[in-house]
Structures are given as C-alpha cells and as structure tokens.
Amino acid sequence: MKFLDLAKVYIRSGAGGAGCVSFRREKYIEFGGPDGGDGGHGGSVVVEAVDGLNTLIDFRYQQHFFADDGRPGQGRQRTGASGGDIVLRVPAGTEILEEDGETVIADMTEVGQRVELAHGGNGGWGNLRFKTSTNQAPRRANPGQPGVERTIWLRLKLIADVGLLGLPNAGKSTFLAATSNARPKVADYPFTTLHPNLGVVGIDGAEFVVADIPGLIEGASEGRGLGDLFLGHVERCAALLHLVDGSSGDPMADWRTIVDEIGAYDAGLADKPRLTVLTKIDTLDNEERAFLRDELQAVAGGEVMLMSAVSGEGVPEVLRTLRAQIGARRARARREEVSEEDAPWQP
C-alpha cells in the first residue's frame, strides 16, 4: 500500500426535495383541500475516523463525494424520501482543512469520531403547510434547499509516541528496523526514506509507537531536499529522538541544522522533550566517543547518550529513557485533564 498523507477532496451535500402541490380528490368529498407532502431532506457529508487505516491512498482514486438528493413530496400528504448520507472514512490523526490549506475544520484524533462537513438541504414544504383559515386552497409549495458544495484538504498526521529526527543517513531507519518489526528501506545513500514509517517498540514489558520520517537538510524549511512537510507527522509525539551521526565529521553542525529547521517549522516542536543520541559509535574508539559526547553536550546544553543500532550497544538505555519521558508526558496530560474537569464553572 502506498503512503499518502495529503489529498484534495470535493464534496457536496444533497439538495432537499421540492414540496408538492396537490389536492384531495375523492368521490363524495366535495372540498378535499390541499394534501401535498413535503420534500425529503438531502443527504449530508460526514467524515469518520476509523481503525485500520494509516494512509489517505483511497482518496487518490476518488476525489469527488456527492450525497444523495431528497425526493420530492407527493400527494396524500406523503413526504419524499430523504437522501442517504455519505461517509468519508479517514485514519485517526487526519486534519480536515479548508480550501486555503490553513484553516482547520476538524482534527480527527480518536477512532469513532464523526464530524459533519456539509449539511444536507431541507426539503421544501408542500401546499398542505400553507393552508390557513383565509387561504384554504393554497397553490404554492417551496423548492428544496440546495446542497452545500465545498473543497477541502485532508492532511494526515501520524499518531505516534516518539518521533525520529536527524539528517539523511543519521541511522533513523536502522534504529527503527533494529528495535521493531518495521522494515524500512536502509541503504548507504541520502534520502533512503521517502515516506514516514511506523514501528512498535517494546522494552521492559512496555510498548510505544515510533515514527520515522525522511531526513531534514539545511534549508528544508525553504523547500530544499524533501522539505519539512513531513514534520507534521511528529507534531503529536510525546517525545522526540534526535539522532546525530557520530561518523559525519562535524556532529555539532549536524545538531544545529536540525534544531534550526524545527525552530523554523514551529508548531511547538522545539518545546517537546527531546533526547539527543550520538549514533554509529561502533565506528568510534573510546577516546573519540568521549570527546564527541562532551563537545555535543556543550552545544546541546543537556545530556547526550551513545548508541549503535547495528551492534545494539546503548539501545536498551535509550529506549528506557524514552519510555520514562513518554510516561511523564502522559501523566502530565492526565493531570491537566483532571484539573480542567474540577475547575469551577465560569460564565
């Protein structure tokens, strides 16, 4: 299955059915009066977050979604049938945006969440509705309301606990392949990863989801390389794992490049808990390891861990640290939810 995280969709709700002009015509009933029924309601367009999807590939082959129109009313006070709704099924984590690509209509973060995007038109009134004491034989009926037509964007932001950051060939895909059952492409040339990958990582009986995104380069925020659009997939992560290649020749400059790019992207990524790890230490001797770690800690202003995804050295320690950060973030989120629920009501 191909990965697609952005799709443009055209939707239209159904128009309401027209009301009916009709009069009761039966033998021995001289003044039957009006009996035209109302038109049926048009169908609505609804989006629903479902389980089992992790891509928007279905919307590459179908971009137009039109709900059914309501049927017109009929005589004998019969209301027309309502049009059927149409449901757009999207993965959890999908944002619904206006045509400008910036205004957020809805954020589908939970499985089962439903949002109405276009309401169906109301059916028109039949002439029975217009009967009064002074107008007992109305010959008018309303047309149905037209449907709502709009263009929207669907943007998928994967829901993961940890997001991997780093330059191309920093070892992100190797780390994901070594710690989970995911099998991302691994090769010795830049931009091996062209689309995000998810993997479930386990340590000490606990599991969490890790998202690997294509590498960033200097100027990615300006469109260089693959750009920084993929950073949207780590916006929802509880923690970020910043991998720095220890064999690159200048790990400190590599670290600054990534930090500058996530700062330019904004969206709160710079404020998320971030663990910096010096990778590929199997290519370094003990003296080089100690020197590079001290230099990187001075630049990063925090702890730097050492790891080799190939040999497995340092991997369990990194996973335990990530697990602790995720647990702390979740506990803080729960406390905030409880405090909001207990807050006194204010007008």
Image (spheres, grey):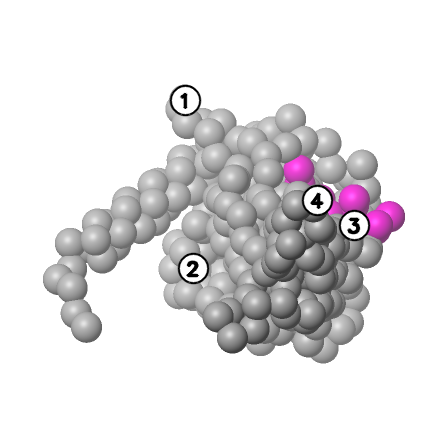
Q: Nearer the viewer, residue 50 or 41?
A: 41
CA gap between label 1 and label 4 equals 82 Å
Write the start and end of the magenta stretch as one range: 53-62
Find residue 188 and name its label. none
CA gap between label 4 and label 2 equals 80 Å
Find residue 205 and name its label. 1
Considering only order in the chain, which callout, 2 or 3, is on the residue closer to the N terminus?
Answer: 3
Residue denoted by label 2: 272
Circle nearer the viewer, 3 or 1: 3
Q: Nearer the viewer, residue 146 or 193?
A: 146
Going by the numbered disc 2, the residue's amino acid type is Lys
Up the image or down, 185 lies above or below 64; here it is above
Chief secondary structure of the magenta portion: loop
Q: Secondary structure at mark 4?
A: loop
Residue denoted by label 4: 27
Going by the numbered disc 3, the residue's amino acid type is Phe
Residue at x 62% of width, y 57% of height: 31
Q: Secondary structure at mark 2?
A: loop
CA gap between label 3 and label 4 equals 57 Å
Up the image or down, 214 lies above or below 51; here it is below
Going by the numbered disc 1, the residue's amino acid type is Gly
Up the image or down, 12 lies above or below 160; here it is below
CA gap between label 2 and label 1 equals 25 Å
Callout 2: 10 Å neighbours few (<14), some, many (20+)? Answer: some
Identity of the residue furthest to the top in this view: 205
Circle nearer the viewer, 4 or 2: 4
